[in-house]
Image: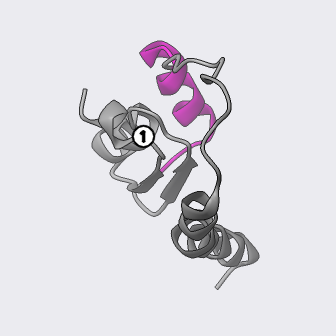
């Protein structure tokens, strides 16, 4: 197993195990968040995946993947496996 896969695996474990526990214990926000979801334009997604030379042998982890367009495009176009990680699943349903 390569160092890259080990690091990615540890990141997934952290997101799957530690982050939800921390999120459940967080106090209610004192104000409305001041950030908005801004999707990456599809032509930028295509260029990033091409530049990264994604192949069917890759597993793409996209932390905070929003509507999932990056991992979905990687899977559909290049056959890569994807592990989208997002906090707001409503964005992925769009």
Q: Is residue 13 magenta?
A: no
The magenta-colored residue range is 40-55
Going 53% across and 16% down the picture, which residue do you hit?
A: 38
Asked if residue 89 lies left or right of residue 32, the reply is left
In the rendered image, which quarter contains the C terminus? Answer: top left
Q: Is residue 22 above or below residue 84?
A: below
The residue lying furthest to the right in this view is 3
Majority SS type along the magenta span:
helix
Image vertical order of residue 20 relative to residue 80, above or below: below
Q: Residue at x 68, y 32 (%)?
A: 30
Asked if residue 2 lies left or right of residue 9, the reply is right
Q: Position of residue 2 (x, y in %)?
A: 69, 79
- Mark 1 element type: loop
- Badge 1, how many Cα within 10 Å: few under 14, some, many 20+? few
Image: 1 above or below 51: below
* Nearer to me, 72 or 18: 18
Left or right relative to 23: residue 6: right
Residue drawn where x is 24% and y is 34% of the image: 93
Query: Residue drawn at (64%, 55%), measured in percent from left and top?
Result: 26
The percent position of residue 70, horizontal first and vertical second, equals 45, 36
Q: Quick check: is 44 in the magenta stretch? A: yes
Pointer 1: what residue? 88
Where is residue 57, by image quadrant? bottom left
Residue at the far left in the pictured view: 93
x%, y% of residue 13?
58, 75
């Amino acid at each position: 197993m390569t160092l890259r896969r080990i690091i990615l695996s540890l990141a997934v474990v952290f997101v799957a195990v530690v982050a939800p526990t921390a999120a459940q214990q967080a106090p209610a926000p004192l104000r409305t968040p001041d950030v908005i979801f801004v999707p990456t334009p599809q032509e930028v997604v295509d260029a990033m995946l091409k530049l990264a030379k994604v192949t069917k042998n890759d597993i793409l982890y996209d932390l905070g993947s929003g509507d999932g367009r990056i991992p979905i495009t990687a899977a559909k176009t290049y056959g890569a496996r994807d592990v989208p990680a997002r906090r707001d699943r409503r964005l992925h349903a769009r």
